[in-house]
Amino acid sequence: MKIRTCLMLLSLGLLPLAAAADDAPAASTASSSSSDDPIGQFLKGQSISLGYSYAQGTFKMRQGSTQSQLTDNGRASPIINYTTGEWVLDKFPMKYGDGAIGVNLGGSFGEQDTHFQLNPQSSAIIGQDLNSKVTGDYLTAAPLLYLRLGPVYPGSDSFWLFGYGPGLALYHFSGNPIFYTPQKGGYLATSSPVSSSATLFLFQTWRWQFHYGNWDMLFIGRQLSGRKVAGYNTSYEDYSLGLAYTLRF
Amino acid sequence: MRMPALGSVGLLLVALWGSQAQAAPDNGFGVYLGAVSSSDSSLYGNSHGGLVAVDAQFMLDEHWSFNPYLLLDSESTDNSFDVENGEGGLQARYWMGDGFIAPQFLFHDTLLKRGGTVSSSLYGPGIGLAAGWEGDSHWTVMLATNVFRLASGYGAPATTRSEALLLLGYRWGGKP
């Protein structure tokens, strides 16, 4: 609390420096504020990104205090993403190029192979092999609303992007998770088969992306949820960090 | 940790007051090393540790820049927990000569480890405020404070974590 207060005071103390900056010679902005948006031109087309990521997926089912969670403990996973051209909702000038708030549509395919059980005695993120598993796959489609900034250097093909997208996923799975129910002094563990044919789930995705040249560093979060299967609230989450080569056409 | 942090704030304040407007800040990439001190309302008490961070700087005009960043830290606590924390955020820096202040918004994932085993993964959004200075030599110093809730997906009660960070860094910037 003291430190936050101190930083607030520091912020107030900085205000007089604004005047000093105003008196300073004009900064080197000769090449500034162009109405050109080369990144926007670049993003007008459709694209396919192909690459590899390190990803971790976690499957969850919950009904009251009874729950089951399985994970894949992390794995190498291919990146196969299709993205439409962008629609620019708003633009603002930057020193080099324009920033933009934009929307595109994206689709992706994912596979689930969760066979490590998270249980009350295990790590919260690294599961144990208890002969339980749930496997499946899904197709997703979602608009992505994002803030885009760039280029980093004038004339370079580089930008940073952060976006959120709500959409739908067609998801099916099957397996035999272990469910844990709190009891006096411990947990009751029961194994039972579950399955779901291809069903629409609510899909949400978050994307942190840095693009340079034809390469993209991507941090992507994906969540499928909003459905009950056999009375259990069911969801699947996948977080990945990867590198992809982007083809535009 | 509190007193060194306050002392550092004072030193930075003096440095900022004494600084003159030099070359304008420009786009570029930054790498930072630093220290973190945090406190939590009920889970682990206080912690301290080291951090590494990277950012990219996008100038909007001579006063404003957006700086998306990533940060990882490792902390030991008063309790039997260790903490590993990752953050991804966006700073909006207001530049006054070589100094800046910056409100920031972030997402975090905080891992609580006991005996080498991750016992909880707590994640969610947070907010903060940073202040710093970047010289013509491209060396930079920054102080930041953040606050966020440690909300678990397991239905455990949420708590609040506040943290103070001191970062020293270098920026590769300007026109290539």
Image (tube, helix red, strand yellow):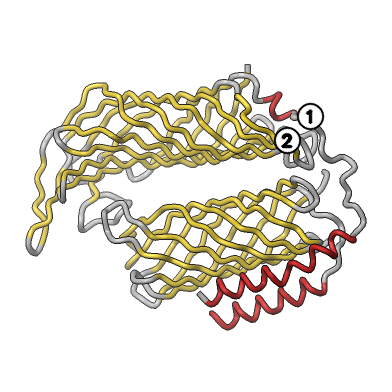
Q: Residue furthest bottom?
A: B3
Residue placed under numbered mark 2 in the picture: A98
Does dot 1 land on a helix, a strand or a loop? loop
Q: Position of residue B138 (x, y in %)?
A: 78, 59
> Furthest residue to the right?
A25
- Marked residue chain, label 1: A
How packed mark 1 is, by other alpha carbons closer than 10 Å (few <14, some 14-19, many 20 or more), is few
Residue hosting label 1: A36
Query: Which of the chains bears the disc numbered 2?
Result: A
Residue B89 is labelled as none
Residue B51 appears left or right of A176: right
> Which residue is at a point 89% across and 61% down the rendered structure image?
A23
Instruction: Evaluate if marks 1 and 2 touch, with contact meaning CB atoms under 8 Å apart.
Output: yes
Instruction: Give the quarter of the figure containing the C terminus of chain A.
Output: top right
Q: Is residue A6 left or right of residue A30?
A: left
Residue found at x 56% / y 36%: A146
Residue drawn at the location 16% of the way across and 51% of the way down: A65
Whichever of labels 1 and 2 marks the residue nearer the N terminus, that label is: 1
Q: Is residue B161 above or below residue A25?
A: below
Distance (Cα) linking label 1 and label 2 = 7 Å
Crowding near pointer 2: few (<14 within 10 Å), some, many (20+)?
A: many
Work out whether B123 lies above or below B11: above
Task: Give the amino acid type for the residue marked by disc 2 in the picture.
Answer: Asp
Q: Quadrant of residue A63?
A: top left
Instruction: Residue A142: give x, y in percent of width and height.
Output: 45, 27
Q: Is residue A183 above or below residue A35?
A: below
